[in-house]
Amino acid sequence: VHLVKVIDGENQEVYWSNITHNLTDMAEAAGIYEALWRPYRLKENYVPTEDYDKELDFEDSVQVLVEEIIPVLRKGLDNLLSRPKYFESFNSPNGWGTYKHFIPFVKDYLNACELNPKATVMVWR
């Protein structure tokens, strides 16, 4: 389960949602995996590593503002909407993670981000 919290400057929760991890392949293909599950990887000073502890340390050391992921989400949503049949091929066979459920999630999340661009993104997985 993926939980996103967007916190405003006063640490008030302004949005949260969750979505199954079964959609990671679809998100990756759309170019929004990092924005949804690993936003810290979009930071300019992020260096990929196989060391789990170093990865976690980096994630804990940075703050990701919503405005940093909005362009990625917009582009990804456009990609998803432009090729529905392609992205439907990533639907989970068990029905837990489908294109028809992912689109509203991404739209709602992007809308919340656009309403709160200075908020902080927090992801639990």
Image (tube, rainbow, N blue to C red):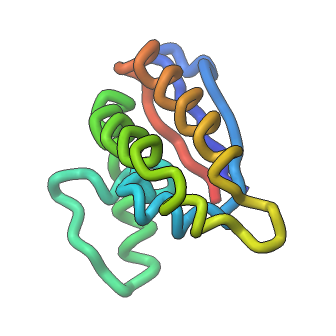
In which image quadrant can residue 105 be found? top right
Query: Is residue 59 placed above or below 11 in the rendered structure?
Result: below
From this viewpoint, which residue is outermost toward the right?
A: 94
Q: Residue at x 63, y 46 (%)?
A: 102
Q: Nearer the viewer, residue 54 or 43?
A: 43
Q: Residue at x 36, y 20 (%)?
A: 117
From this viewpoint, which residue is outermost toward the front?
A: 85
Q: Report whether 45 appears left or right of 2.
A: left
Q: Report whether 29 appears left or right of 109.
A: left
From this viewpoint, which residue is outermost toward the left?
A: 44
Q: Is residue 63 visible?
A: no
Q: Nearer the viewer, residue 33 or 87?
A: 87
| Percent x, y of residue 36 | 49, 49
| Percent x, y of residue 2 | 66, 53
Q: Nearer the viewer, residue 109 or 26?
A: 26
| Percent x, y of residue 66 | 38, 30
Q: Residue at x 40, y 44 (%)?
A: 82
Query: Is residue 69 placed above or below 44 in the rendered structure?
Result: above
Q: Is residue 84 visible?
A: yes
Image quadrant occupied by the N terminus: bottom right
Image quadrant occupied by the C terminus: bottom right
Q: Residue at x 66, y 32 (%)?
A: 16
Q: Report whether 68 appears left or right of 44.
A: right
From this viewpoint, which residue is outermost toward the bottom?
A: 50
Q: How many marks can you see?
A: 0
